[in-house]
């Protein structure tokens, strides 16, 4: 009797297991959508606002996306100020991860800053609007070949040079859109005075009657 019960029990366990396995196999796998990391990052201009709110310096002179040991992204940006101060921000949360106070102003940097007419963050904002780029790798104030200040802004697949005095984009050249032909200003046509028609029946007297 015990052997019979044991046999029935084993058969019942096998049947239940086979049903559960069939249900598990028939169910399609559930795919969890993933969001690309670049879509989770805070816009750079907002990170600039966070960095400047810390009052570590008066002017940002460089912004750099930090890299790991093997060149991978760390998910952070480092902002450097004119006095050597630095702050590292999380690119996804804006959290301050570490900061370093400045000790001494760099004379060369201060000389370049005195000649600038536009800040690094304003130049960066204008460039991002023109070229529709959003993945910044680095932005830096430096001197050109003759010592004038310029901003070098590097994206994932584009490098832009900006005249830091005028804000003009030096490289790559930006084409000014031309006005389509159908929208060009029409040429002005000079109006000629209308001639008064002469009535054949009207008598015409000469201007100098002395000739007759």
Image (cartoon, helix red, strand yellow):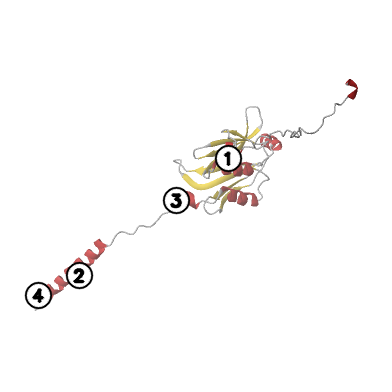
Mark 1 crowdedness (10 Å alpha carbons): few <14, some 14-19, many ≥20: many
Residue at horizontal 48 percent and vertical 46 percent from the top: 74
Q: Nearer the viewer, mark 2 or mark 3?
A: 3
Which percent across, then down, holds residue 27?
28, 62
Marks 2 and 3 sit apart, C-alpha to C-alpha, by 42 Å
Compared with 173, 98 (above or below) is below
Circle 1 SS class: strand
In the depicted view, which residue is nearer to us: 20 or 13?
20
Mark 3 crowdedness (10 Å alpha carbons): few <14, some 14-19, many ≥20: few
Dot label at residue 139: 1
Q: Which residue is mark 4?
A: 3
Q: Which residue is mark 2?
A: 16
Which percent across, then down, holds residue 71?
46, 40
Circle 2 SS class: helix
Marks 3 and 4 sit apart, C-alpha to C-alpha, by 60 Å
Which percent across, then down, holds residue 17?
20, 67
Compared with 9, 160 (above or below) is above
In the image as oriented, which residue stretches furthest toward the right?
A: 210
First-in-chain label (3 vs 1):
3
Badge 1 vs badge 4, beta-carbon distance below 8 Å: no
Circle 4 SS class: helix
In the depicted view, which residue is nearer to us: 155 or 7?
155
User: Does the image show residue 7?
Assistant: yes
Horizontal side, residue 145 vs residue 10: left or right: right
Horizontal side, residue 101 vs residue 205: left or right: left
First-in-chain label (4 vs 2):
4
Marks 1 and 2 sit apart, C-alpha to C-alpha, by 65 Å
Horizontal side, residue 175 vs residue 202: left or right: left
Q: Which residue is mark 3?
A: 36
């Amino acid at each position: 009797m015990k052997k019979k019960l044991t046999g029935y029990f084993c058969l019942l366990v096998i049947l239940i297991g086979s049903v559960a396995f069939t249900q598990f196999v028939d169910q399609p796998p559930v795919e969890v959508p993933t969001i690309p990391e670049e879509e989770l990052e805070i816009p750079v201009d907002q990170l600039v606002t966070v960095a400047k709110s810390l009052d570590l310096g008066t002017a940002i002179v460089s912004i750099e996306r930090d890299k790991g040991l093997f060149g991978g992204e760390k998910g952070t940006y480092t902002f450097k100020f004119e006095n050597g101060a630095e702050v590292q921000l999380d690119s996804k949360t804006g959290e301050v991860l570490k900061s370093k106070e400045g000790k001494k102003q760099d004379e060369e940097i201060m000389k370049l800053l005195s000649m600038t007419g536009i800040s690094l963050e304003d130049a960066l904002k204008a460039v991002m609007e023109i070229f529709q780029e959003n993945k910044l790798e680095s932005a830096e104030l430096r001197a050109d070949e003759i010592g004038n200040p310029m901003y070098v802004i590097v994206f994932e697949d584009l490098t832009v040079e900006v005249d830091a005095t005028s804000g003009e984009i030096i490289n790559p050249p930006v084409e000014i859109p031309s006005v389509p032909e159908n929208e060009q200003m029409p040429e002005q046509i000079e109006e000629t005075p209308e001639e008064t028609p002469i009535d054949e029946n009207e008598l015409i007297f000469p201007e100098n009657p002395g000739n007759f």
